[in-house]
Amino acid sequence: MKSVIRLFFRLLRVLLTPVMLLQEVLTRPKAVTRSPEVQSDVDLACQSLALYQFKACPFCIKVRKQIHRLALPIELRDAQAEGPDRQALLAGGGRVKVPCLRIEHADGSSEWLYESDAINQWLEKRFG
């Protein structure tokens, strides 16, 4: 019975993932426009940020829409598959939970910000 349930949810995920990704592309908000000087400063500030995410996670999609709206070149790291990004999230943040924004501070310390609403608020406050 467990294998049937797992198969059902895998099939559901396979069917819904393309729909969710298409919906993300079609409903992206318009990006803000900044002067080249201001955008250059934003680009430089975003070099210390990385978003750990799963491609089809609805909360990650919510954060990616905010990133697009604010025209932020934040590095996206896929933590779904076993690999270095997932291990870095576990080692640095303490748990594999997405979305997670890693913020590198000037003193070399890292802050790991979880929860889509908290991330979106931080991005809005910092870059909005």
Image: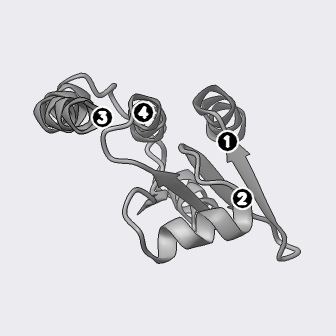
User: Marks 1 and 3: which is nearer the front?
Assistant: 3
Q: Secondary structure at mark 4?
A: helix
Q: CA distance from mark 1 to mark 2?
A: 9 Å
Neighbourhood count class around disc 1 (C-alpha, 10 Å): few under 14, some 14–19, many 20 upward: some
Relative depth, front residue between 2 and 77: 2
Neighbourhood count class around disc 3 (C-alpha, 10 Å): few under 14, some 14–19, many 20 upward: few
Q: CA distance from mark 3 to mark 4?
A: 41 Å
- In the visual, does 22 lie left or right of 128? left
Q: Residue at x 44, y 38 (%)?
A: 60
**Mark 3: which amino acid?**
Lys
**Mark 4 lies on residue:** 69
Q: Are marks 3 and 4 in contact (CB under 8 Å)?
A: no
**Mark 1 lies on residue:** 114
Q: Residue at x 72, y 58 (%)?
A: 93
Q: Are marks 4 and 2 in contact (CB under 8 Å)?
A: no
Q: Secondary structure at mark 1?
A: strand
Give the image location of residue 45, x and y in percent. Answer: 64, 61
Whichever of callouts 1 and 3 sits on the residue coming sooner in the sequence is 3
**Mark 1: which amino acid?**
Tyr
- In the visual, does 128 lie left or right of 26? right
**Mark 2 lies on residue:** 93
